[in-house]
Amino acid sequence: MNFARVWPSFTGFLIITAASTLLESAPVVQGQELPSSQPSIWATKPDVTAFEKMENNRLAAAQKAVDQIVAVKGGWTIENTLAPFDEATRQLNATIEFSSFMQQVHPDATFRDRATAMTTKASAAGTALSLNRAVYQALSSLDLSKSDPATRYYVHRQLLEFRLAGVDKDDATRAHLRELNDKLTDEQSAFDRNISDDQRSITVDSAKDLEGLPQDYIASHKPGADGKIRITTDYPDAFPVITFAKNESVRKQLWIAFGNRAYPKNRDVLLEMMRTRQEIATILGYSSWADYNAADKMISNGQNIANFIRQVNEAARPLAQREFAMLLAEKNKTSPGAKEIMDFENYYLRELVQRSGYNFDSTSVRPYFAYDRVKQGILDTAQKLFGLTFTQEVGAPAWAPDVETWDVSEYGKMIGRFYLDMHPRPNKFSHAQMSPLLEGIRGKQLPEGALVCNFAAPTASDPGLMDYGDVVTFFHEFGHLMHQILSGRQQWAGVSGISMEADFGEAPSQMLEEWMRSPQVLATFARHYKTGEAIPAELVARMNRASAFGRASWVSSQDSFSAISYEIYSRKPQDVDLDAVTDGATRQYTLLTPLPGTHMFASFGHLGGYSSAYYTYLWDKVIAEDFVTQFDPANLLAPAPAARYRHIVLEPGGSQSANDLVKNFLGRAQNTAAFQKWMGEEFEGQQSGN
Ligand SMILES: [Zn+2]
């Protein structure tokens, strides 16, 4: 997903965890009026000149609001200070969200380039605001004693974010911080660019070396003029080979090529990035970047990250051992006496066990997932779950002809709008994400967001059959969209939408993935595209059990990545040996043996953006599984728990601490029991082997 941020050079979007006790009883805002309608974001069909004019007008409005605050000399109030500050935030958010979206999806290259330049310009305005001492002083002088909890929470977290930016430092230090942040931005871009620029490849002598791969893969990899077949390290090219190729030496060579992308170039870039971050953290009074970066998140400090990584390891280990025994037994069929499994063999062996041990072939479910049926099924599921009505605005203009515009309404009133940009186009963003476009504000602005995916479009001769994993991705991203829309009745833009702690954002969407595993839910829309037969519950059960195999090993790998991300940013850069950290984490957290001669840290892109916060994925997975316990597994569409979830977790947006949202919904502290059960689901009903 895409968390648009007003101040992208700094740690992210606000939060203060210490304030949470004060705000525990913050009421959920309900039944507040939104505007009854508003023109869609693309209503005026802007060309690039009109787009720039719109964006510049927003930036000018933001600046005007900032000037208004600075002009107040004493006597700062919610009305003369927080209101214009929030207006500046609303305008800056909308500018950056729109420009970064256009740079990803607009079909015209000039438009995309000018949108990129606009994002840089708007980000600079955000950085300038984050270091504006007059604004900081005005906000910190506000009397909040009569304010509602959401307003108090907003100001507290905003002040923290100002301090994390260094606003209270002297002029020279602030100037230095700005330089360091610019330097960090450049280092991050270089790190990313080195990864995307370094496509490597191997060649194999003939199609025989690709035995085990699907026929359409082999057909699309024809020998070149030299008679050899070239396989690149791009994901769609490399992972089928690593997963299916019977030829071990081909898998191994490709793994080595894959694990050396951006090496050695990125070793130096990463070390430089670590030094820059350490210097920023030190100036701001933190002993490490990991501590600094955690200060505005749920997890709150580096030690808690270390504890979480250890806790996950303890939960996963016994189950990973059972999975390991099955993988090794599979390996022993062709390598009798082997005692270890190399990291590159994991994918291949897991696939074999899923087929031999669980009698499931993933291609067998595709005929039940034709695109149009899946789309309707996902819209229906979300409407039922959250009590909403979606209506397509037929013929509404958009940035590309196949983009759909939909209104969201409740009790006959419009409460938001979303766009579906679902199929590939040349030069379009190539993964799947939800892009927020406007934050909802009571009485002022309806929330809007867009889903950007790349599923094959159905044609007259082809229903666009989807892989099951893509169906799950679709609903996952739709979950982000629902969060954006349903949290859109706040008083303030700064706490609306997905503005909460960055390490909570994936929990609601990961939770909804479970709905796509329910036979009850799938039966409502998954029908065979030829016969119309509903997907058999027995097939869903087999699919669920087979796909559960390998979860504990997957968690162990994710835990080792989290440890790498934490360790390199929690120590002094001069004390870090990157190869030793990555090799050590694989050995400590997984049961796999790392293949010598690879340097995965060089292509671990999240070390740039997420830096020390890669734990986020597992952190949110633990919360997501705990959330599922509040629903009836036999009837996931029951309205009562869904309504409760919507009110307690989604509607508050960023107006309360996410730690409180979690506790309020669970009615207790979170724990790892449900996560542990999820990890071991393939063994359910069996005796423990240990
Ligand atoms: Zn997501």
Image: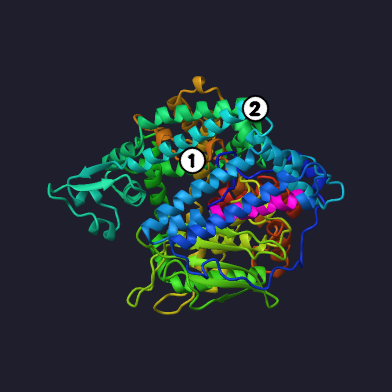
| Residues shaded magenta | 81-96
* Furthest-top residue in this view: 575
Which amino acid, mark 1? Answer: His
Residue pointed to by mark 2: 286
**Quarter location, residue 418:** bottom right
Vertical side of 445 occupied by 138: above or below: above
Looking at the image, tell me whether mark 1 or mark 2 is earlier in sequence order. 2
Q: Please check the rendered image and state whether residue 92 is part of the magenta-colored stretch, yes or no.
A: yes
Which amino acid, mark 2? Answer: Tyr
Residue displayed at 56% across by 25% down:
279
SS at circle 2:
loop
Q: From where the camera sits, is residue 16 visible?
A: no
Q: Position of residue 169 (x, y in %)?
A: 67, 29
Vertical side of 393 occupied by 61: above or below: above
Q: CA distance from mark 1 to mark 2?
A: 22 Å
* Furthest-left residue in this view: 226
Q: Position of residue 578 (x, y in %)?
A: 45, 26
Judging depth in this view, the residue of 99 and 596 nearest the camera is 99
Q: From where the camera sits, is residue 363 visible?
A: yes
Left or right of 203 in this view: 318: right
Residue displayed at 67% across by 42% down:
298
Query: How many marks can you see?
Result: 2
The quadrant the C terminus occupies is top right
Picture disc at residue 606: 1
Q: Label the magenta part by its dominant secondary structure.
A: helix
* Furthest-right residue in this view: 146
In this figure, which colouring scheme has been used for the structure?
rainbow
SS at circle 1:
helix
